[in-house]
């Protein structure tokens, strides 16, 4: 999920399977309304992935649609500062546990 958020923050549209955590973050692009931040495909269905990739290629070739898709991706990005802070705290805690264990072993 964090990598997906990084891509959204960079304004990069996502192509995701319709399973897993990112499926709730990806809103399929609609050419009529020019809304959405990516494309979804049916998991484990080769033809569905191929269709999503072909559609992505078509959207990429249209400047107006690709710009709208990128804007939708960037607008959908979540602030991951809280998540990053929690990971930092947890990694520091684990580091201190290792330091303590090593000190006791000596």
Image (cartoon, rainbow, N blue to C red):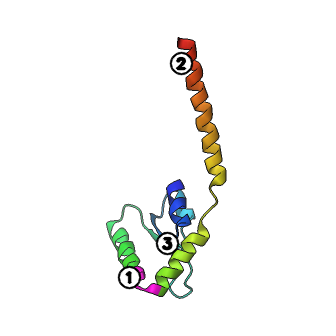
Q: CA distance from mark 2 to mark 1?
A: 57 Å
51 displayed left or right of 8: left
Sort mark 2 into few (<14), some (14-19) or many (20+) by Cα contacts within 10 Å.
Answer: few
Q: Report how many numbered discs are placed on residues in the image.
A: 3
Q: Are circles 2 and 1 on residues that touch, CB within 8 Å?
A: no
- In the image, residue 50 lies in the stretch drawn in magenta: no
Residue, far right: 82
- Reading the chain from its start, which is encountered first: label 2 or label 1? 1
* Residue on which disc 1 sits: 58
Taken as a whole, is the magenta stretch helix, strand or loop? helix
* Residue on which disc 3 sits: 38
Residue 24, picture quadrant = bottom right
Magenta part of the chain: 59-63
Q: Are circles 3 and 2 on residues that touch, CB within 8 Å?
A: no
Residue, far top: 106
User: Where residue 44 is drawn, which disc sits there?
Assistant: none
| 75 in relation to 68, above or below | above
Q: CA distance from mark 3 to mark 1?
A: 13 Å
Q: CA distance from mark 3 to mark 2?
A: 47 Å
* Residue on which disc 2 sits: 102
Q: Nearer the viewer, mark 3 or mark 2?
A: 2
- Reading the chain from its start, which is encountered first: label 3 or label 1? 3
- Residue at 37% across, 61% down: 44
């Amino acid at each position: 999920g964090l990598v997906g958020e990084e891509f959204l923050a960079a304004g990069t549209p996502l192509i995701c399977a319709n399973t897993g955590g990112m499926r709730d973050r990806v809103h399929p692009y609609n050419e009529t309304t020019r809304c959405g931040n990516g494309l979804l495909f049916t998991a484990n269905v080769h033809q569905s992935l191929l269709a999503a990739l072909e559609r992505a290629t078509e959207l990429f070739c249209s400047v107006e649609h690709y710009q709208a898709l990128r804007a939708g991706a960037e607008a959908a990005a979540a602030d991951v500062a809280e998540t990053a802070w929690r990971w930092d705290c947890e990694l520091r805690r684990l580091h201190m546990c290792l330091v303590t264990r090593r000190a006791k072993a000596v």
